[in-house]
């Protein structure tokens, strides 16, 4: 936020609990109150506890689907109709490469993001006729604060792809900016892999 302000932009922070649908709806309303309208929605929050299926606890299952699926669902429910009324808007969902193939220990996370990829297509069909573009990006292993705890496992995942290195958040952001821009005006309902070529092999 400080970097945005230092560059002459405007930035505000609103706290929300994405595990609570009431808080999610309130977040959308606060965003509207701050800016008057929303042009771009990026659903980039996600939780990813990795574990064998038999060890996944019910509370973890519920939390992952609440944050990774339900929160984006209700943010779109609150904001996309208003975008449609104005005749334009862009929604970008962040998924994951493991939404597209099986990976041991990642069934819960991968399935939640696979649901988000299907929602991307459904929302594109629903809101696209009214000028709202809905797309997704599918990152591979990426250096973030959240993935730091994965240690060597992050590099091991990256080694399964042609590029054979862990990506950066800035590289993923480049794809998001493109999809949000007018340069992507004809792109609707797609998922852009930013995974070092993992889905190509």
Image (tube, rainbow, N blue to C red):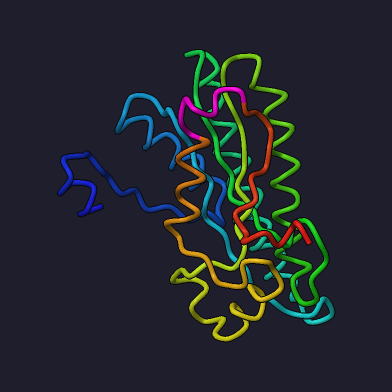
Q: Quadrant of residue 107?
A: bottom right
Q: Considering depth in this image, is 184 or 34 the residue closer to the camera?
A: 184
Residue 147 image offset from top left, x and y in percent: 52, 73
Whether 7 is drawn above or below 35: the answer is below
- The quadrant in which the C terminus is found is bottom right
Which residue sits at x=69%, y=70%? 59
Whether 119 is drawn above or below 55: the answer is above
How many marks can you see? 0
Residue 30 image offset from top left, x and y in percent: 37, 37
Whether 186 is drawn above or below 93: the answer is above
Classify residue 155 as left or right of residue 126: left
Q: Considering depth in this image, is 61 or 135 the residue closer to the camera?
A: 135
Q: Considering depth in this image, is 20 or 36 the residue closer to the camera?
A: 36
Which residue sits at x=71%, y=45%? 117
Q: Considering depth in this image, is 1 or 182 the residue closer to the camera?
A: 182
Which residue sits at x=67%, y=59%? 197
Residue 60 image offset from top left, x and y in percent: 68, 70
Q: In the image as oriented, which residue stretches furthest toward the bottom?
A: 152
Read off the magenta span: 180-186
Decide whether residue 161 is among the magenta residues.
no
């Amino acid at each position: 936020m400080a970097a945005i302000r230092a560059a002459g932009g405007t930035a505000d922070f609103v706290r929300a609990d994405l595990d609570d649908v009431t808080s999610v709806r309130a977040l959308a309303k606060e965003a509207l109150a701050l800016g008057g309208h929303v042009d771009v929605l990026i659903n980039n929050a996600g939780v990813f506890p990795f574990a064998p299926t038999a060890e996944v606890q019910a509370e973890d299952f519920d939390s992952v689907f609440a944050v990774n699926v339900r929160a984006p669902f209700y943010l779109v429910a609150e904001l996309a109709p208003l975008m449609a009324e104005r005749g334009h808007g862009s929604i970008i969902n962040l998924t994951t490469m493991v939404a597209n193939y099986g990976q041991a220990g990642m069934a819960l996370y991968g399935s939640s993001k696979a649901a988000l990829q299907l929602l991307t297509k459904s929302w594109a069909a629903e809101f696209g006729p009214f000028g709202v573009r809905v797309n997704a990006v599918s990152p591979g292993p990426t250096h973030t604060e959240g993935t730091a705890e994965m240690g060597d496992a992050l590099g091991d995942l990256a080694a399964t792809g042609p590029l054979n290195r862990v990506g950066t958040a800035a590289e993923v952001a480049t794809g998001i900016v493109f999809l949000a821009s007018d340069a992507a005006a004809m792109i609707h309902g797609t998922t852009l892999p930013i995974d070092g070529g993992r889905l190509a092999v």
